[in-house]
Image (cartoon, rainbow, N blue to C red):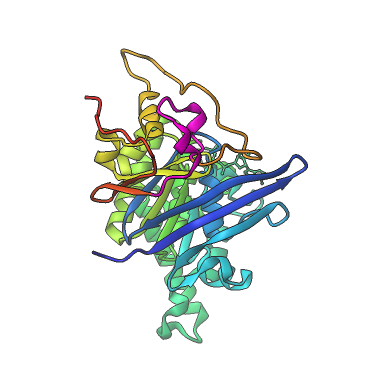
C-alpha cells in the first residue's frame, strides 16, 4: 500500500482567552495518502479550520498553544520547522490553501495578473528548473504561458483579459476558480481546501467541486477538504474523518461512512441530513464548552449509549478496511 503523504499524530492545540484555555484539538490523528481526497466533517466549531491552520503553520501566534503532537510531511515534523522555512519551502508550494471566502484572499488594489505574477515570483515550480537558471525573463514568459493554460483548465474564459481585471470585477465563482488555479500552479503535493464553496450559490458549488476533484485526480494531488456539508463530502471524497469537539471519532471510506457509520455521533450527523420525510433534524444537546470539556469521549454527555467507561477516551478500533472508530459502544447494526 502507498505510504502516507502527511500524518497528523495526537495533535493538541488550545487557545488562550480571558475565560481560560480552550482545548480545541484534543489528540487528533489522521493521515492522507498521495492523490487522496480526504473529507474532514463535523459541526461548526469542532476544530476543522484549526486543524487546517495547524498543518499550514498559520495559527494565531498570540493565542494558539500547540500542546503536543506531530505533523509529519516529507520526512519532517512541520511543527518543529522554522517559520522562514515553512513560508519559503512548504506553504503555497508543497502545501497549498484554498480558503473559504476568496474575496478576502485577494488584495483589492492590485490586478489579478499582478497578484498571480507575485505568486509565481516566489512559488513557481520553474524556479527549480535548471534550464531557467540565470534567465529570469525566460522564466517569467514561461510562467505566464502556464498561468494562461491554468486559467483555461479551471474554465475561466478569456484569461488574458482576466489578468488585467481587479478582484472586484469578477464573480465569486470566478474568484474561487482563480483560487484553485493559484493553489495548483506551484504544483503542490497537498491542497487544503477549507470549506471552499461555502460562500457560493448551490449550482456554482457543484461545478467547483467537480473541477477540484477532476484536477486533483489528474495531477495526483492530495486534498484535505473540510466541510460541514455531507452532500459535498459525498460528491468528492475518497475517505472521511469525522470530528467532534476537537476529537476525531471515526474515519471511513466514503461508502462505509454513509452505509455503516459506527460512531453514534456519525449516525446522528447522518440523521440530521434533511430528507423529504423528516425535514431538517438537529442533534439534541449542545457542543461542550472547550474550556472545561467532559473527560474521555467528548460526545458522552449527548450520547444515548454512554456509560461510565466513556469518561476514558477509547483507542481507535479497526472495524473494516480503512475504517476505524473511537467508541466503547460502537454501532453494529445499520439503518437501511
Ligand atoms: N483564534 C482563536 N481564538 C480563540 N478561540 C478560537 C480561535 N479560533 C478558533 N477558536 C475556537 O476553536 C473552536 C474550533 O473552531 P474552528 O474554526 O477550528 O472550527 P470549525 O469546525 O472549522 O468551525 P466552522 O465549521 O464554523 O468553520 C471554536 O470553539 C472556536 O471558537
Quadrant for the N terminus in the image = bottom left
Query: Which residue is depicted at the point 37% across and 21% down?
Result: 274
Split into quadrants, the picture shows ligand 1 in the one at top right
Q: Report x, y in % for residue 259.
A: 24, 34
Principal secondary structure, stretch drawn in magenta: loop
Query: Which residue is depicted at the point 56% across and 56% down?
Result: 54
Is residue 277 among the parts visible in the rendering?
A: yes
Q: Report x, y in % for residue 322.
A: 27, 51
Along the line of sight, the residue nearer the viewer: 60 or 178: 60
Does 300 appear above or below 109? above
Does 138 appear above or below 96? below
The residue most toward the top is 277
The magenta stretch is 297-315
Quadrant for the C terminus in the image = top left
The part of the image, by quadrant, that contains residue 209 is: top left
Check if residue 307 falls in the magenta segment.
Answer: yes
The part of the image, by quadrant, that contains residue 110 is: bottom right
Q: Report x, y in % for residue 4.
A: 34, 63
Amino acid at each position: 500500500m502507498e505510504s502516507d503523504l502527511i500524518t497528523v499524530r495526537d495533535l493538541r492545540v488550545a487557545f488562550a482567552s480571558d475565560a481560560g484555555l480552550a482545548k480545541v484539538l484534543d489528540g487528533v490523528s489522521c493521515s492522507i495518502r498521495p492523490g487522496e481526497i480526504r473529507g474532514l466533517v463535523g459541526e461548526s466549531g469542532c476544530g476543522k479550520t484549526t486543524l487546517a491552520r495547524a498543518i499550514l503553520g498559520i495559527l494565531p501566534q498570540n493565542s494558539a498553544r500547540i500542546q503536543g503532537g506531530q505533523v509529519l510531511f516529507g520526512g519532517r515534523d512541520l511543527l518543529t520547522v522554522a517559520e522562514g522555512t515553512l513560508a519559503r519551502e512548504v506553504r503555497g508550494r508543497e502545501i497549498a490553501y484554498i480558503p473559504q471566502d476568496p474575496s478576502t484572499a485577494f488584495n483589492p488594489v492590485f490586478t489579478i495578473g499582478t497578484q498571480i505574477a507575485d505568486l509565481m515570483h516566489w512559488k513557481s515550480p520553474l524556479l527549480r528548473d535548471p534550464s531557467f537558471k540565470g534567465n529570469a525573463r525566460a522564466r517569467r514568459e514561461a510562467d505566464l504561458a502556464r498561468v494562461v493554460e491554468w486559467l483555461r483548465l479551471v474554465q475561466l474564459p478569456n484569461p488574458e483579459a482576466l489578468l488585467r481585471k481587479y478582484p472586484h470585477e469578477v464573480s465569486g465563482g470566478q474568484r474561487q476558480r482563480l483560487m484553485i488555479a493559484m493553489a495548483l500552479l506551484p504544483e503542490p503535493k497537498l491542497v487544503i481546501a477549507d470549506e471552499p464553496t461555502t460562500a457560493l450559490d448551490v449550482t456554482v458549488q457543484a461545478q467547483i467541486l467537480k473541477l477540484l476533484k477532476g484536477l486533483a485526480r489528474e495531477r495526483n494531488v492530495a486534498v484535505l477538504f473540510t466541510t460541514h456539508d455531507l452532500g459535498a463530502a459525498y460528491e468528492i471524497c475518497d475517505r472521511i474523518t469525522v470530528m467532534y469537539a476537537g476529537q476525531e471519532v471515526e474515519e471511513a471510506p466514503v461508502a462505509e461512512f454513509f452505509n455503516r457509520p459506527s460512531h453514534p455521533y456519525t449516525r446522528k450527523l447522518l440523521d440530521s441530513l434533511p430528507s423529504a420525510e423528516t425535514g431538517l433534524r438537529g442533534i439534541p444537546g449542545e457542543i461542550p464548552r472547550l474550556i472545561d470539556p467532559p473527560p474521555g469521549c467528548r460526545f458522552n454527555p449527548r450520547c444515548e449509549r454512554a456509560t461510565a467507561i466513556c469518561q476514558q477516551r477509547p483507542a481507535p478500533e479497526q472495524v473494516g478496511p480503512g475504517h476505524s472508530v473511537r467508541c466503547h459502544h460502537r454501532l453494529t447494526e445499520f439503518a437501511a
